[in-house]
Amino acid sequence: MKVKGSRSCILFLAIVAVLFIGGSAQARIKLVDGVFLDAYIRPRIELDARDFEGKGMDQYSTLRTRLGFTFENVIEDVTIYVVLGDSRSMGYSDPYNTGKPIGPNQLDDNVGMVEGWIRINHLFVQGDYLQAGRMQNNQGRNRIFGPGNWSHNGPRTYDGIKAGYETENVKFNVWSLYGLNGDRHWYPDPSQLPSYKAPYDEIDYKYDHTLNGFDLRFFNEALQFLAFLDYDQAMIEDETTGEENPASARYTVAVYGGFSEEDDWIGAGGLRLDIDAAYQFGTVGTTAGEADISAYLLLADLAYSFGGQYAPWAGIGLDVSSGDGGGNSKEVHNFYDYYYSRHTWRGNMDYFKNPFAEPALGLQAYVARAGVSPAKDLSIKADCHYFRTEQPYVSLDDGEDAHELGVELDVTMVWKIRKGVSAEGGFDFFWPTDDWQGPDADTATFIYFAVTGKV
């Protein structure tokens, strides 16, 4: 038990050693021919006063630690990648999710496999591949699928299989992955057969939740197309007819395009334009029967940098999606987005992460951005968001229909201390409307500091 409980300490010490032994190089380290190591560690302190009640700040810290091993062409045309990881709220250990802390110096069995996959290249023809295991599935600029890197449990990964074909300018990928609720099958203890009993009678363990789709990428991924089916096979009974329908058969088609004259458009100067557009259709099972989906998402960002020593830049953007007022049980018009990198979009304070809350009303975010580099290896940016909903909600101030939610200001500073080591600080403020949080609501604040080291 002593050895088993020491794994987190061993992992932490290994990564610290890698950071110092590896020097300042921000790249994987070659151990022997075909075997490489990469490492990542990020402690973060957060000061949280997002309750709109003015009762002071909660302080908490998180730690994310990752250690990856790549085996490249040790077997001809085969890549194997395994990432071991530990995620924790610092000072609090609850590896078995019991809800009770066991203390930082007792048994901790929190280390697990974050990624683990095998990829076979040139299986049939030059340029094709087959990949299976636990992997990431990031798309575009992470608005539909993203790694969710803000979470200390990230990056977001999926179990499943991918295959594709790649050339210098074109990439095609097709994939079948487990979705939100994954594999619902319950595997009984063979010794209990044939009299075993499922843990919960109300759950039908025969149905899976899967993500099946493909993506097509051109021009060094500057133009991308995406289509997938989010299929939740849990059956929902129609109380009017007794029939059962899948919880969701939601199709999404999307396109992303990004253009700039230079890859480093901020430092070199010039324009940058990014556009995302998506449409959803299909059906949702409800107790009133099957409802048809028709929903959209649109993002656009335009920015200009003056380049030079301080590289000042400014831009504007929008992130809007359709909403549903709930007036028709046979139609669904809210755009459902669960798998994107939520902290990257719609404000750093994460008020709009729940797809069934304000986003279901059709969240609209209009953004003004600006940034500057006042010193070498130091950058500062500010994002100002104005939030409202397409569909009305009931005002907490006067009980009437309302749309406005408030204004959020996010100021972020990044200092590249060494190549591979950076420090980041964020200062975020939200001024809510009286309609959304009531006339007595206070300004919300959120502050964080993080140090990231990776090789």
Image (spheres, helix red, strand yellow):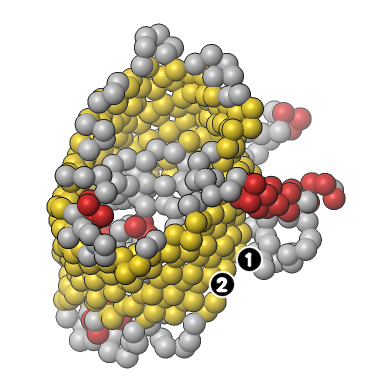
Who's the residue at 70% across and 66% down the image? 101
Q: Looking at the picture, how far across and down is residue 224, in whole percent?
A: 23, 35
Instruction: Say above or below: 52 vs 186.
Output: below
**From this viewpoint, which residue is outermost toward the right?**
2
**Dot 1: element:** loop
Who's the residue at 37% across and 63% down the image? 376
Q: Residues within 10 Å of mark 1 (few under 14, many from 20)?
A: some
Label 1 vs label 2: CA separation? 8 Å
Who's the residue at 37% across and 17% down the image? 128
Q: Please say whether residue 244 is visible from this viewpoint.
A: no
Who's the residue at 22% across and 59% down the image? 308
Asked if the residue under mark 2 is in contact with the one under mark 1, i.e. CB atoms within 8 Å, the reply is yes
Quadrant occupied by the C terminus = top right
In the shown orientation, is residue 116 left or right of residue 207? right
Q: Looking at the picture, how far across and down is residue 323, in whole percent?
A: 19, 58
Quarter location, residue 75: top right
Q: Looking at the picture, how far across and down is residue 165, in whole percent?
A: 33, 20
Considering depth in this image, is 177 or 250 the residue closer to the camera? Answer: 177
Disc on res. 60 = 2
In the shown orientation, is residue 146 left or right of residue 420? left
Q: Please say whether residue 7 is visible from this viewpoint.
A: yes
Quarter location, residue 197: top right
In the shown orientation, is residue 13 left or right of residue 119? right
Instruction: Say above or below: 355 vs 370.
Output: above
Disc on res. 90 = 1
Q: Looking at the picture, how far across and down is residue 72, in whole percent?
A: 54, 24
Of the residues shown, which amino acid type is indicated by label 1?
Met
